[in-house]
Amino acid sequence: MDNSISYDGGFKFKPDYKWPEKGTEKECPKCSEKLELVENRKTYFGKPWWCVPCQWQFSEEDLLKAREDSLEEE
């Protein structure tokens, strides 16, 4: 019996996150602390932005959505 499975195109382990330019600064939408911009390395598979106090990762899309949501609440 053949138990092998083939996926067309395979799996993609590193999503295509938009990486901001070095020196860009952003604030955490949860705690308003300064976010850390993680270096875009081949061996890093997370999102570009890291909040040290919250221990949470954010993508540019996450930050945009959070901003839009906060504007709707006002």
Image (spheres, rainbow, N blue to C red):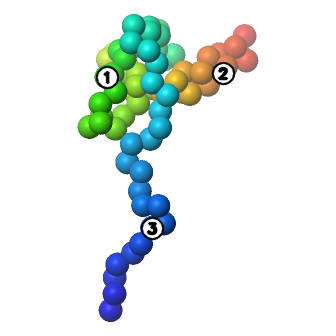
Q: Name the image quarter holding residue 44.
A: top left
Q: Name the image quarter holding residue 72.
A: top right
Residue 5's spot in the image, x, y percent? 39, 75
- Outermost residue, bottom direction? 1
- Outermost residue, left direction? 43
Q: Please, what secondary structure does the residue beneath circle 2 have?
A: helix
Residue that badge 3 annotates = 7
Classify mark 3: residues with Cα within 10 Å, few (<14), some (14-19) or many (20+).
few
Q: Say which of 21 and 29 sits in front.
A: 21
Say whether disc 1 or disc 3 marks the residue closer to the N-terminus: 3
Image position of 13 with respect to 71: above or below:
below
Classify mark 2: residues with Cα within 10 Å, few (<14), some (14-19) or many (20+).
few
Q: Are marks 2 and 1 in contact (CB under 8 Å)?
A: no
Q: Please, what secondary structure does the residue beneath circle 3 have?
A: loop
Say whether disc 3 or disc 2 marks the residue closer to the N-terminus: 3
Residue that badge 1 annotates = 39
Say whether disc 2 or disc 1 marks the residue closer to the N-terminus: 1
Task: Tell me the kind of residue under disc 3.
Answer: Tyr
At 34% from the left and 82% from the top, the residue drawn is: 3
Marks 1 and 3 sit apart, C-alpha to C-alpha, by: 30 Å
Task: Tell me the kind of residue under disc 2.
Answer: Asp
Residue that badge 2 annotates = 69
Q: Please, what secondary structure does the residue beneath circle 1 have?
A: loop
